[in-house]
Image (cartoon, rainbow, N blue to C red):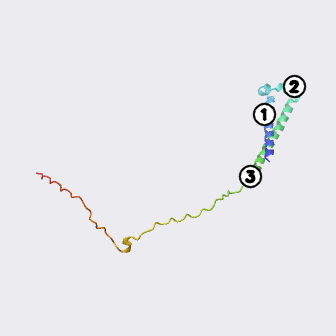
Amino acid sequence: MSILIGIFTFALILISLFLILVILAQKSKNDGGMGAALGGGMAEATFGADTGNVLSKSTINATIAFFVLSFGLYLGHLYVAKAEKAAAPALPTISAPAEEAPAAVPAAPVEAAPEAAGEVKFDVTPVATPAAEAPAAEPAQP
């Protein structure tokens, strides 16, 4: 299908260029402008007195071909998009290995506190403190 879309797109580009040239080659109503500059007189010499009819008919035919090809390409792109959407799964499937539950952190062994056993032990070792000097007496203020 994509090959046909490519071929029709190329044909549409060619028809577009032809349509531009045919429109520019036509004489305007007041015999001036781009039509005279791009060979309006040459077209009369080639096609004779019916130049307006030939260019008008080719413009109409090229315009019809342009619109038919444009609509056909639109439908072709819709078809391709719908086919791609149908071929793709609705939701992506992700396969991942199942993780094991994290192992419980082993708790540190708890020793029974003496308070828990009903006993209270106090440390009664004497602590040696240096002898502090007695502060000097301050003179009394009058």
Residue at figure coordinates x 85%, y 27% from the top left: 43
Mark 2 or mark 1: whose residue is earlier in sequence:
1
Question: Quick one: 8 or 67, which is closer to the camera?
Answer: 8
- Say which amino acid is labelled 2: Ala
Residue 110: x and y, percent?
43, 68
Instruction: Check contact, mark 2 vs mark 1: CB within 8 A.
Output: no
Residue 15: x and y, percent?
81, 37
- Say which amino acid is labelled 1: Ile
Residue 45: which disc? 2
Foreground disc of the pair 3, 1: 3
Mark 3 or mark 1: whose residue is earlier in sequence:
1
Neighbourhood count class around disc 2 (C-alpha, 10 Å): few under 14, some 14–19, many 20 upward: few
Neighbourhood count class around disc 3 (C-alpha, 10 Å): few under 14, some 14–19, many 20 upward: few
Return the residue at label 3.
Answer: 84
Residue 139: x and y, percent?
12, 52
Q: Is residue 127 left or right of residue 83?
A: left
Foreground disc of the pair 2, 1: 1
Q: Is residue 31 visible?
A: no
* Above or below: residue 34 compared with residue 111: above
Return the residue at label 1.
Answer: 20
Q: What distance separates the C-alpha of mark 2 from that of mark 1? A: 21 Å
| Residue projecting furthest to the left | 142
Residue 111, quarter of picture:
bottom left
Q: Is residue 8 left or right of residue 98?
A: right
Mark 2 or mark 3: whose residue is earlier in sequence:
2
Residue 41, quarter of picture:
top right
Residue at figure coordinates x 80%, y 45% from the top left: 3
Q: Is residue 35 visible?
A: yes
